[in-house]
Image: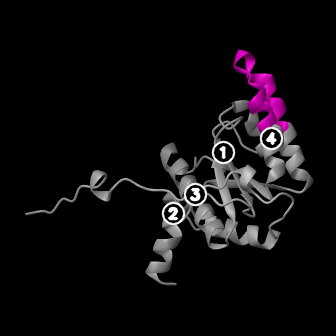
Amino acid sequence: MTSEWFNQLARNRRSTFPDQFEPGKKVDDAVIKEILINATWAPNHGKQEPWQFNVFTGDGLKKLAQFQSNLYKETAGENFKEITYSKLQQNPLKASHVIAIGMKRTLTKNIPEIEDIEAVACAVQNLYLSVTAYGLGGYWTTGGITYKPAAKEFFGLGEQDKLLGFFYIGHVAIPSTGSTRSPLEEKVSWIYSQ
């Protein structure tokens, strides 16, 4: 691997949304396993590895779709939107795999919660880079039921844990368009000691 290859990988990573996936085309489970192994090599404080991944595929996608759409309907109250409900029912079925992203709270060491969250976010970046390297599409969503406490039990998460969203993976039928970033000078300050 060269630095130029990695530069291109990182700079060409894009979110690929469920409507952009090739319908019905499955990613091999062995590839998903490799992608998940890459995710687990993310940096984490105290080597606690606070991530927990639940992988839905095949009929499991229907189970996820049913659970999340029903929970949304039960808890949305007057904020209920039919379009959100429909997306929660349909979007998982457009993917090859959906990975529920959990953060298992590190309680054995004095590690701030935000550092466990940051470690899981690093793992998600590894998911993104991995799907890009495999020529697949990926999308991290935090919508729907992500922050609802009532969702935790379904994903094997305890009271101190957090559900941090869902990562959709599929074969790309419609590529994402290019993207831009602000000039580096607008976001970076260089400090040299004198």
CA–CA distance in space, label 3 to label 2: 30 Å
Q: Which residues are magenta?
A: 67-87
Q: Read off the residue under disc 3.
A: 177
The answer to which of marks 3 and 4 sits earlier in the sequence is 4
CA–CA distance in space, label 1 to label 2: 19 Å
The answer to which of marks 4 and 2 sits earlier in the sequence is 2
Quadrant of the image occupied by residue 3: bottom left
Q: Read off the residue under disc 1.
A: 165
The answer to which of marks 1 and 4 sits earlier in the sequence is 4
Residue 43: which disc? 2
CA–CA distance in space, label 3 to label 4: 35 Å
Q: Element type at marker 4? A: helix
Q: Read off the residue under disc 4.
A: 154
Res. 48 in view = no
CA–CA distance in space, label 4 to label 2: 27 Å
Q: Element type at marker 3? A: loop
CA–CA distance in space, label 1 to label 4: 13 Å
Residue 168 percent location from the top left of the image: 72, 54
